[in-house]
Image (cartoon, grey):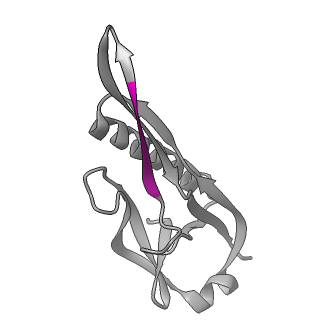
C-alpha cells in the first residue's frame, strides 16, 4: 500500500519516487493511483509527527554517474523516512510541483590535476532540500 503522497489540486494522491538523472525533473514523483485523500480531510484523519528536510551530496569524475549517485542517496533517505512511519501513517511531499522550492541537483565543476593531466571533478548537492511531512492516523 502506498504511503507517500503529493498534492494535486484538491487531493493528496499516492506517488512513487522517480529520481532519474536523465529526466528533465530529476527529483520526480509518479502517481500510482492507489490512494487519494481529500485535502480538507487531512487534519481530521492524520496528525503531523514531523517534517524532515532531505538533501544529499556526491562527488566524482564522471558527470552522469555522479549525478545519479546523488539522486540514489536522496532516494535512500526518502525511503528511510517513509519506513519510519507508524502503521497506517503517511508521508506527504511538501515541495511545490514546479515551484521555487522544487529540489534540484546543483552542480559545481572544478579542474584537478591527476598524474600530470587536467581532469574535471563534479560536485553535486540537492538544493533546496526535499521536504517530507510524516503523519500518523488520529485516534
| Residue 124 in which image quadrant | top left
From the top left corner, tell me how far across and down residue 99 is, in percent: 47, 75
From the top left corner, tell me how far across and down residue 112 is, in percent: 39, 22
Quadrant in which the C terminus appears: bottom right
The residue shown at (58%, 62%) is: 131
Q: Is residue 125 above or below residue 42?
A: above
The residue shown at (38%, 65%) is: 29
Q: Nearer the viewer, residue 136 or 5?
A: 5
Quadrant in which the N terminus appears: bottom left
From the top left corner, tell me how far across and down residue 116 is, in percent: 31, 9
The number of callouts visible is 0
Q: Nearer the viewer, residue 12 or 115?
A: 115
Q: Main secondary structure of the magenta part?
A: strand
Q: Is residue 33 above or below residue 25?
A: below
Q: Residue furthest top?
A: 115
The residue shown at (56%, 52%) is: 83
Please state if 97 lies on the left or on the right of 43 as rendered: left
Q: Nearer the viewer, residue 77 or 106?
A: 106
Q: Residue furthest left?
A: 22
Please state if 28 lies on the left or on the right of 24 as rendered: right
User: Magenta residues, as a range?
Assistant: 104-111
Q: Nearer the viewer, residue 29 or 95?
A: 95
| Residue 89 in which image quadrant | bottom right
Q: Is residue 75 above or below residue 2?
A: above
Please state if 52 lies on the left or on the right of 9 as rendered: right
From the top left corner, tell me how far across and down residue 97 is, in percent: 44, 74
Specify whether residue 109 is painted magenta: yes
Specify whether residue 14 is painted magenta: no
Amino acid at each position: 500500500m502506498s504511503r507517500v503522497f503529493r498534492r494535486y489540486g484538491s487531493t493528496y494522491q499516492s506517488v512513487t519516487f522517480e529520481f532519474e538523472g536523465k529526466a528533465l525533473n530529476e527529483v520526480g514523483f509518479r502517481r500510482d493511483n492507489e490512494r487519494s485523500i481529500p485535502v480538507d480531510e487531512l487534519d481530521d484523519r492524520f496528525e503531523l509527527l514531523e517534517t524532515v528536510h532531505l538533501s544529499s551530496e556526491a562527488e566524482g569524475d564522471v558527470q552522469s554517474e555522479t549525478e545519479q549517485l546523488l539522486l540514489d542517496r536522496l532516494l535512500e533517505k526518502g525511503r528511510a523516512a517513509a519506513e519510519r512511519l507508524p502503521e497506517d501513517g503517511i508521508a506527504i511531499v511538501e515541495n511545490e510541483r514546479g515551484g521555487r522550492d522544487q529540489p534540484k541537483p546543483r552542480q559545481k565543476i572544478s579542474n584537478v590535476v591527476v598524474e600530470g593531466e587536467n581532469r574535471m571533478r563534479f560536485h553535486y548537492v540537492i538544493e533546496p532540500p526535499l521536504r517530507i511531512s510524516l503523519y500518523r492516523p488520529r485516534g
